[in-house]
Every structure is written in C-alpha cells, then in structure tokens.
Image (cartoon, grey):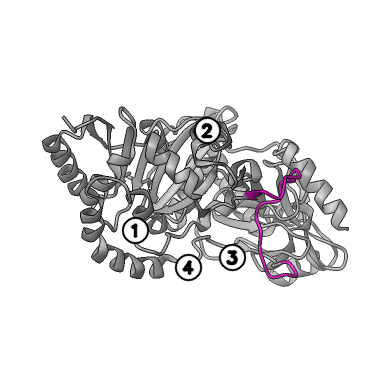
Amino acid sequence: MSENIHQIQSDCIQNSRVTWEGCSVLLDINDGDRLVFARLSAGAKLKIGNKNCSLQPLIGCAFGSVFRVETGTGGEPYLSIFNPSVKGNNIQDIGDCQTADELRDNRVLIDDNKAQSLTGEDINEMRRQGATGDEIVEALIANSSTFEKKTLFSQEKYRIKKQKKYAPKVLLRRPFARSICEAYFKKYPSRIGFLRVDALSLLLSMANVSANSDVLLVDMLGGLLTGAVAERLGGVGSVCNTYLGSTPYPMDIVRIFNFNNEICKRYFSNQIPSYKVCSLWGMFENQGIVRSSLDDLSSTQNGSQEQIAEHKDSGNMKSSISDQISSPVSMEEISIAPENGISDFSHATISPVTKSCRSLKAGEKAQPEVIKLWKENGFTSLIIAAPDLNTWRLVKDLLPLLSNSAPFAIYHQHLQPLAICMHKLQIEKMAIGLQISEPWLREYQILPSRTHPCMQMSAFGGYILSGIKINSSN
C-alpha cells in the first residue's frame, strides 16, 4: 500500500496537474459561495450543505475538475465528476435568445409562498428513491405555478438557486499564490494584512523576484509572501525569512502550496573548508526556504550592535505578536493526521545523498556557511510586509544587507509609515528611484447587455514603497 502511495506521489510530482494523496487543494463550492482548503486523504470528509462527503474521489483527478454531490442507492452522498457542457442553459447565453415579444416583467408575481406545490416530504421521498439533484430541480420547476410567468433572467436565477441547494458543485482548484491570496482576502483579509492579489503581484515585480535570486523577506502575513516568492523562484534561488528576537514568524500558509523538495529542501555538504566556500557558490545558490534572525545576519555589519539594541524592546513586543498569530491561518483545513501524528505536506521523492550532506526543510534555520556568503555578497532583493513593526527602523537595519543596486519593496496597509520611511531614505541618501504606489483593481460583471463594475468590491489595496539601494558610505 505504501509503495502504491509513493508511486502515485512520484507520478503526480512529475505531473503537477493531477492531485495525489496528501496534497492540499482549494475547493470552490457553488461558484465562490464557499472556499475551503483541504488536504486529500482516504478518510477526509467535507460537509457540503447538510451532507458529509468523502474527498477520496478527488484523489488522482486533474485540477479544474468539477464535481457534483449525488446521493447513492443507500442514501449516502458522494462526489461525482460533472461535465458543465452537458447542461445547455447558461445565464450568459440567454440574452441572445430573448426577443422583443418575449420581454416580460415580474410585477404581477406575488411572493406568498404558495407558488410551489412540491413539499419537503415529497423531496425527501424523491431522495430516498435515488433521484439526482438535477431531477429534483426539474421537479421544482415543473411544480411552480409562477415559473413560466417570470422573465428569462429570473427563470435562470431560480434554476441556479435551486441547483446550489439540491445539486451543489465543487470546483477542484490548485492552491497557488493567486488563488490562496484571493481566498484569504475574501474570507479572512486581516490574516494576510489586507494584501490584495494585485498588490501581491506588484510587490513581487517591484522587488524583481526571478530565478537565481536571493530574496530577503520580513513576512508577517502568515507565510503567504514567502510562498509566493518561492513559487516564483521555482526552486532556483533562495528565500531567507528574517525575524526580530528569538521567535520566528509563523509560515503556516507555505504548506498549502504543495512545494516539493526541489523548492523546500536543498542538499549541501557541511564539511566544506572556509577557503572553498566562495568557489563552491553553485552548491549553495539553491537553498530553498530558510530562516535566520536579524541578529545573525547583522552580526558583522557596522553599527549593528546599536541597531540590535534598538530592537530589543521591539523583539519583546514581537514575541507577544507572534503568540497572537501563531495559530494556524488556514480557513477550513480538512486534515487526517498520519499514524505518527506528523502532517508533512511535502511528498517529493528524494534522491540518495552521502552521509556528509544534510537536508533543509522549509523554514529551517540557515546554515552558517550560507549566512557568511550572504554577508559577503549581499541579497539581490528585499521585501517587507510587517504592519506591526516600525517600518523605518526595519528598513534601516535590513537595507545594508542588500548588494548595491538591489531593488526593495515594502508593503503597508497605511500610507503614513511608508511616507516617513521614504522621507528618511532620501535624507540619509540610502536609495534612489523611490516611489509609493497604490494598486488599483476594478472587477467587472460580464453579462449580455449588463456589463458594468461589480456592485461590491474592494476599493483599497494598501501601498507599496519601492526603490533601489545605493552605497551611501561616501
């Protein structure tokens, strides 16, 4: 059994379009009415409506597949693959079929709860006889005395409303940076610092995150920013998540990305002489996701002791902040723990290595040799998303860790901290090309003869301060 599981996992790592047992997925129920993060396993179940459905049928299916909740002969609900193209009606196609003589209105309709002759007992009897959700919807339409009097748009809305109740759909989505950010922003925006998806993409672009980059991060958004950077690097580069004090910031969202060992773990020898470290940079360039405190990174920088002393109070404050946000940040995670009680979200097959090599898991402490290289060469990018810390003090300590001409980007929900930081950077002559950007996003409803901006959407996406670090020693 274990060999089959490892074989499935190995095949799915090669084909990332297909789910495997133990992977994380984003379940979109009824076109965004409910978003659920789940971990697929044979025993995992999800409550949809008033039914508990097993998630086992989702294992081995392609991302993007649509499932319908059906009732078996024994009355047990199950998820079956649904092909939307089979059903012909679509609210977007109705506008072409509605001619002038078919135009009606709903003014003559009276909502007195007497239009439907089909009772709840009748519906339960149909379910006991094995009727599908579509058959129940058609029966409700046939027994409605006002359905034919409604407009075509009202008819389709009525059909969709009943389908969501009696035949709910589940879309199997891949959890990547955009989908995870959209899901959290819709449900729990405060957990990711109200970071909208367009602000996230702009943050990565302004920091010039690309392959073979060494990115220094301050991520207090639950690990969303760390996962987004690692996803863009694609396993070719390194992500160093730094923190104040002795307590690292939580990175729970990183495990939702389904990163394999090519991204989370790298292997290198611990027995490399110091005089060969610089010549063996190729062995260190892909370190994956690691952590390092600001004290370790700044230990040899000029004036670092004074800067660390300034942060002692902030570090103590940060301990309490970390305690507040150390709880899991996933929305609804269906997870069946293995027998050993450890939930591992990385199932990539690892090639054999020598005993002198060591693996780095996502979020492990960076090795001293790697920190030494970063101190000598500097990071290629800096991204900060720390709404609870003093932005200017943080930038003043982190900017010297960058190499010259390296870009940086700072996100904050409010404008004033970034404006103060920008002004002091100009006075200290530490950076050029400084600008504060406010991302703007408008979502449109696209329907026949009714295309307009959505009535409810986010009007605020925070602010981003970006610039290029220069050598201010002269």
Residue at position x 30%, y 68% from top?
Answer: 316
Q: Earlier in the sequence, mark 2 or mark 3?
A: 3
User: Above or below — where is 85 with respect to 321?
Assistant: above
Q: Quadrant of the C terminus?
A: top left
> Which of these two is toward me, 195 or 418?
418
Q: Earlier in the sequence, mark 3 or mark 1?
A: 3
Query: Which secondary structure class fits the magenta region best?
Result: loop
Q: Kindly check if marks 2 and 1 are in contact, taking CB atoms under 8 A apart as contact.
A: no
Q: Kindly check if marks 4 and 3 are in contact, taking CB atoms under 8 A apart as contact.
A: no
Mark-to-mark CA distance, 2 and 1: 27 Å
User: Above or below — where is 424 with respect to 208?
Assistant: below
**Residue labelled with disc 2:** 281
Amino acid beneath label 4: Ser
Q: Kindly check if marks 4 and 2 are in contact, taking CB atoms under 8 A apart as contact.
A: no
Crowding at dot 3, Cα within 10 Å, few <14 / some 14-19 / many 20+, comes out as: few
**Residue labelled with disc 4:** 327
Q: Kindly check if marks 3 and 1 are in contact, taking CB atoms under 8 A apart as contact.
A: no
Looking at the rendered image, the disc whose residue lies closer to the viewer, 3 or 1, is: 1
Residue 453 x/y as whole percent: 38, 37
Q: Earlier in the sequence, mark 4 or mark 2?
A: 2
**Residue labelled with disc 1:** 244
Residue 312 x/y as whole percent: 26, 64
Mark-to-mark CA distance, 1 and 4: 19 Å
**Residue labelled with disc 3:** 114
Q: Earlier in the sequence, mark 1 or mark 4?
A: 1
- The residue stretch that appears in magenta: 338-358
Mark-to-mark CA distance, 4 and 2: 37 Å
